[in-house]
Amino acid sequence: MSTMTPLRAHAWIAELAHADTDGVLLRPSAEGIAALHQLGRVAWITQLGAALDLPAPPARWRLADASLAALTPAQRGALLHADRPLLPHVREETRDADGSLLLRLRVPLDLVHFDGHFPAAPVLPGMLQLGWALALAAPRLGTAAECREFEALKFQHLLRPGDDVLLHLRWDAARGKLHFAYRWGDQAYSSGRLLLEHAHG
């Protein structure tokens, strides 16, 4: 029997693309993502690893955010060996008539920051949300990636692995302030204004 067979049938897994001592590449099911929220990555992987019949633990685990079915073997191998993400996945972006941006984001399941915040209850850090706003605005709005001061910060709900969220960015060049707001439907996650060091031309 294949070493992948017990894992492939696990309720936490929607797709299993690779499983051996080199590593495991999978896409979690909705039930699996809920378990990831409750357990954290280490405990989640430990429980799944118990279903593998391998001579040694896998060298790495990679959790995909999108379907793996259409990927070539080379693409799956690259995904398995890629560094874990530091930034969100940008799924869509639109620009309003006033120049503001609306970005549809997915919080990566495999985001490296979840290891420390918090290992047993992964939550997207508030300071990282500010950093993402700066990093995503800079190449699109021509703003600086450095911030001098925060204003009117509100953190209302937690962002978790696999969450979809809309990020609204508006640059007030006259005041040197970047307005940001993370929302999804009627749910407000965080918002505020960032006073930037300077703006690029």
Image (tube, rainbow, N blue to C red):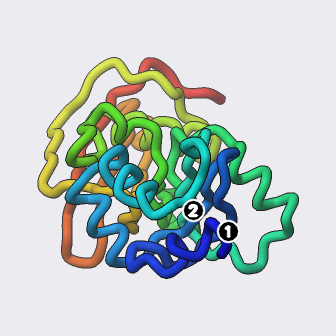
Residue on which the image places disc 1: 17
Residue plotted at (39% across, 79% down): 11
Q: Nearer the viewer, residue 62 or 184?
A: 62
Residue plotted at (42% across, 43% down): 133
Looking at numbered disc 1 in the image, what kind of residue is underneath it?
Ala
- Please give left or right for residue 131 compared with residue 63 in the image: left
> Which of pointers 2 and 1 indicates the residue nearer the eye?
1
Of callouts 2 and 1, the N-terminal one: 1
Q: Is residue 201 depicted above or below 172 in this figure?
A: above
Question: What secondary structure is marked by label 1?
Answer: strand
Residue plotted at (25% across, 47% down): 123
Q: CA distance from mark 2 to mark 1?
A: 10 Å
Q: Residue 39: x and y, percent? A: 24, 54
- Quarter of the image containing the N terminus? bottom right
Q: Residue 17: x and y, percent? A: 68, 68
- Quarter of the image containing the C terminus? top right
The reply to whether callout 2 and callout 1 are in contact (CB within 8 Å) is yes
**Residue 116 can be seen in this image:** yes
Residue 64 — which label? 2
**Residue 102 can be seen in this image:** no
